[in-house]
Image: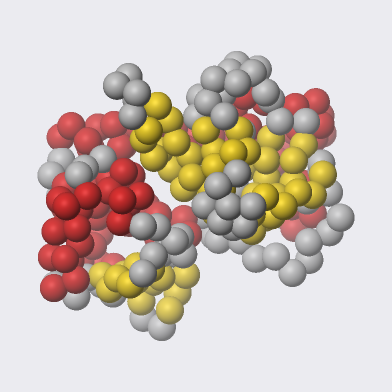
Amino acid sequence: MREPDLRFPDGSFLAGLQPRARAAFLELGTAREFAAETVIVREGEPTTHVCLLLDGCVKVTGTTPEGQLALLAIRVGGDLVGELAAMDSQPRTATVITAGQVRARIFSQAEFRRFLSQVPEAALAVTTSVGAKLRWATRRRIDFGSREVRIRLARVLVELSSSYGIPAGGDLELGVSLTQPELAALVGAAEPTVHRALAQLRRENVVETGYRRLRIRDRSRLAALADG
């Protein structure tokens, strides 16, 4: 089944593939549609299927040692989820749940591995994607213990906008619909603290916010803040 009209964010997995490899990847597996709040993969399960997101947004969550739910990442159309278990056959490390209606293609571990062995470009793209996710996780772990909330917030916004940003005149729309509690979870700080940091960025005209919407008005100032 071809998806000729789909457009994917520049930082997504599919956007990094050449047209021929991307078209071949879109032929894999079975087309599926998921309603909001549907679990696609669950932490700890031994499943190995892979999900290629086409449209919509999912949340990646994990359980802390204290038993709390932590938001680890956001993935959107063009991204892969579940590929790690397909590569190493180990239990799922996180839960992936839809944040709204999602269209995707689901394929088996065998189909996924066979395709990667036949298309080296796709295998390299998957490796690059996994590496980027690990870098994100490492930076968040370091930042949580060593940086003030305002800097951590700026870094998360810079990284999300570089992957999913949509040009809007001279501004940049974040391209991912996030509530303030979800943003606070990604930053690793209490919601009131992140709310105050956002309010300060608004006063400085660095960002503009609305309901589940964030626009970056001054990218250079945000990047300077992210650098500490």
User: In the visual, does 204 lie left or right of 8?
Assistant: left
The quadrant in which the N terminus is found is: bottom right
Residue drawn at the location 49% of the way across and 45% of the way down? 59
Task: Name the quadrant containing residue 108.
Answer: top right
Horizontal and vertical percent position of residue 179: 36, 57
State how many labels appear: 0
Residue 151 visible at all: no
Horizontal and vertical percent position of residue 185: 31, 43
Residue 91 visible at all: yes
User: In the visual, does 82 lie left or right of 178?
Assistant: right
Horizontal and vertical percent position of residue 29: 81, 41
Horizontal and vertical percent position of residue 74: 46, 47
User: In the visual, does 188 lie left or right of 200?
Assistant: right
**Above-or-below relation of 10 to 143:** below
Q: Which of 49 and 124 is in front in this view?
A: 49
Q: Which colour scheme is used?
A: secondary structure
Residue drawn at the location 13% of the way across and 73% of the way down? 203
Residue drawn at the location 54% of the way across and 42% of the way down? 97
**Above-or-below relation of 140 to 110:** below
Residue pushed farthest bottom? 169
**Above-or-below relation of 113 to 197:** above
Residue drawn at the location 22% of the way across and 36% of the way down? 144
Q: Nearer the viewer, residue 50 or 102?
A: 102
Residue pushed farthest right? 1
Task: Name the quadrant containing residue 197.
Answer: bottom left
